[in-house]
Image (cartoon, helix red, strand yellow):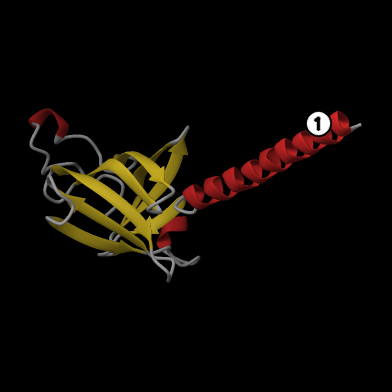
Amino acid sequence: MKKQKKRLLRFQTIYLIWLFSGFFMTLVAQNANEILGKWLNNEKDASIEIYREGDTFYGKIVWLKRGRNLLDEHNASSNLQSRKLYQLDILKNFTYCNTSKEWQNGTIYDPKSGQTYSCKMWLNVNKTLSIRGFVGFSFIGRTDVWQRPQQDHAVYH
């Protein structure tokens, strides 16, 4: 009888651990996905759509104030200067870190300078997105703050 009670208790414990770990993993996934969707850059002249492939996050330009035919003319590589910025992935290879609540280890391409920087991102309390591009160490860099576009913004046209 005691063996059966111990076995039942062990089964219940394992079941509860499994149940709570599934619930926790769902919360982690929801936090990681909060970044998904469209964001207006700091200058409000471009919108970037952040999307997910597997566990990795990317962002591509989906709207440009100056139109879809704008070229990557500042790129250091002359063979890339004729490519269009529209639909270009400028955010690459981010992974979500649950402990720091940041998307890390990615890169950001700045079409205005033609440079690619290391980058990390995090959501602010006011639901804006901080993007920190840097060279080497994150304290040597610049942070821009992006926000979700309004429903009637040209991003949706």
Instruction: Name the outermost residue toward the bottom.
Output: 126
- Side of 93 relative to 73 (left or right): right
Q: Using the rendered view, name the quadrant where residue 66 is placed.
A: bottom left
- Measured as percent of width and height from the top left, residue 148 is found at 43, 63
Residue 43 % position (x, y) = 25, 64
Toward the front, the furthest residue is 2
- The residue sitting at 40% across, 46% down in the picture is 97
Identified at 30% across, 59% down, the residue is 41
Image x and y of residue 90, in percent: 28, 43
Q: Which amino acid does label 1 sit on?
A: Arg
Q: How many labels does the image show?
A: 1
Q: Name the residue: 44% across, 48% down.
A: 98
Q: Can residue 157 be seen in this view?
A: no
In the displayed structure, 28 sits above or below 92; it is below
Q: Is residue 49 visible?
A: yes
Q: Which residue position holds label 1?
A: 7
Q: Which residue is drawn at 41% across and 50% down?
A: 99
Q: Is residue 21 left or right of residue 8?
A: left
Please tell me in which quadrant of the rendered image residue 140 appears: bottom left
Q: Residues within 10 Å of mark 1 (few under 14, many from 20)?
A: few
- Asked which quadrant contains residue 85, the reply is top left
Q: In this view, does 10 lie above or below 29?
A: above
Element marked by disc 1 = helix
Residue 9 horizontal side relative to residue 81, left or right: right
Out of 71 and 33, give the one closest to the viewer: 33
* x and y percentages locating residue 129 in the rendered image: 36, 60
